[in-house]
Image (cartoon, helix red, strand yellow):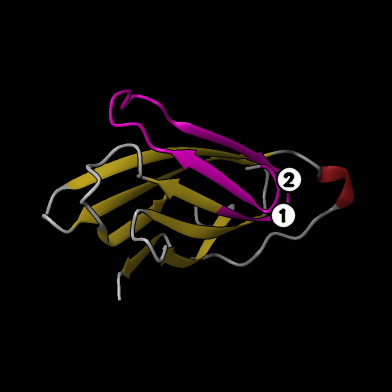
Amino acid sequence: MLGRSTTCNVSGYNREVIHQTRVYPLERRTLIANFNGAIEPARTIVSAQWDIDSPFAVNMSDAAIAADQRSTSVILSCGWAGDNMLRVIATFDDGSQMAQQFYVRCLWAGWFSDVSPANGASRLTVTAP
């Protein structure tokens, strides 16, 4: 989906795919990891752990698990230009886990002297209600 959210449809077959997203400074974007096609129909997400390598360049907030418990999301606030790696580890109701990697590039727009958001969390964890 293009717009205010970017969705990664996690593959259970092609595990080497790293989802790529490009944004400009000061953009806010919801990043969604949809595990629907990667897990059995009966499985649900009970918790998700989001990690980022550079919390000063891209900040994460508001980690969530969707109502159907088959996808998880986090809101990204982009600041400084550069490359950022994110990862989500979803834990399912049977105790199994699956990780998905993300590459987020904050594009250079330095001629506007944009101000980076303050440092954010390097890890967010959310559990299903």
The alpha-carbon separation of the residues under discs 2 and 1 comes to: 6 Å
Residue sitting at 35 percent across and 44 percent down?
A: 36
Residue 35 percent location from the top left of the image: 35, 44
Whether residue 112 is visible, yes or no, is yes
Q: Quadrant of the C terminus?
A: bottom left
- Magenta-drawn stretch contains 38: no
Residue sitting at 46 percent across and 57 percent down?
A: 73
Single out the residue that lies furthest toward the bottom: 129
Q: Which residue is at the front of the view, 117 or 104?
A: 104
Single out the residue that lies furthest toward the left: 94
| Badge 1 element | loop
Taking 6 as reference, is 35 left or right?
left
Whether residue 53 is visible, yes or no, is no
Circles 2 and 1: CB distance less than 8 Å?
yes
Check the image and report above or below for 126 versus 1: below
Taking 114 as reference, is 48 left or right?
left
Q: Quadrant of the N terminus?
A: top right
Residue sitting at 59 percent across and 52 percent down?
A: 57
The residue to which callout 1 is attached is: 27
Magenta region: 2-30
Residue 94 percent location from the top left of the image: 11, 55
- Dot label at residue 24: 2
Label 2 environment density (alpha carbons within 10 Å; few <14, some 14–19, many ≥20): some
Taking 29 as reference, is 52 left or right?
left
Of the residues shown, which amino acid type is indicated by label 2?
Tyr
- Dot label at residue 122: none
Single out the residue that lies furthest toward the front: 41
Of the residues shown, which amino acid type is indicated by label 1?
Glu
Q: Quadrant of residue 93?
A: bottom left
